[in-house]
Amino acid sequence: MRISTKGIYGLSALVAIAHNSSTGIVSLSSIASRLNLSEGYLQQVFAALRQARLVKSVRGSQGGYELDCDPATTTVGHILRSLEGDLLVVDEDAEQKTDNAIRQCLRRNVWNVLNESINKVIEGITLADILADYRNGFDESLMYYL
């Protein structure tokens, strides 16, 4: 399993929106600038995020995006599945090329265990958890004087 740039950028963008949610609507251009990404590519990512009802768009001159989900209950698993589809360690088409008994044994003892472990981890991390860590350790608004 490999998370694509769509998943990485989508998760990053949601953290950026959640971080700026107190200021209201966040423009796509400001998200692109903050993450150093192409605005065109982010439009594709945000189409999937809107479809999953993770963000909602606001039209107009002061338009942009805002969260349409509760960060405390929105898991990384939900976000990544919305952008990537099923998160499986082994593609079942590739797995079909092995002997049936071997395939069943590997699926039961390796692939299913890995899938369950990954899902347990990503379902245990919420958008609020990531946001709290970001604000505690990486808040760009903090100024340090020597």
Image (tube, grey):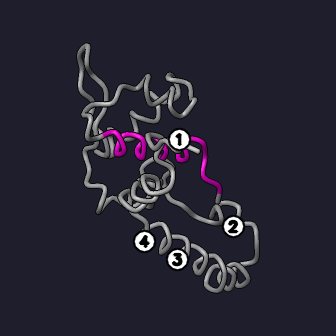
Disc 1 residue type (three-letter): Tyr
Look at the image and give the residue range highlighted in magenta: 2-20
- Cα gap from disc 1 to disc 4, whole angstroms: 20 Å
Whole-percent x and y of residue 144? 52, 44
Q: In this view, does 35 lie to the left or right of 64?
A: right
Name the dominant secondary structure of the magenta segment: helix
Mark 3 sits on what residue?
A: 116
Disc 2 residue type (three-letter): Gln
- Cα gap from disc 3 to disc 4, whole angstroms: 12 Å
Sequence-wise, the earlier of marks 3 and 1 is 1
Give the residue at the far right of this rendering. 98
Q: In which quarter of the image is the N terminus?
A: bottom right
The circle on residue 124 is 4
At x 48% / y 53%, what residue is drawn? 85
Sequence-wise, the earlier of marks 2 and 1 is 1
Which image quadrant is residue 106 in? bottom right
Whole-percent x and y of residue 145? 54, 43
Disc 3 residue type (three-letter): Glu
Front-lying residue, 91 or 53: 53
Front-lying residue, 77 or 63: 63
The circle on residue 9 is 1
At x 71% / y 61%, what residue is drawn? 94
| Residue 5 magenta | yes
Q: Disc 3, disc 2: CB below 8 Å?
A: no
Q: Disc 2, disc 1: CB below 8 Å?
A: no
Mark 2 sits on what residue?
A: 96
Q: Which element type, helix, strand or loop, lies under badge 1?
A: helix
Q: Disc 1, disc 4: CB below 8 Å?
A: no
Q: Quadrant of the C terminus?
A: top right
- Cα gap from disc 4 to disc 2, whole angstroms: 31 Å
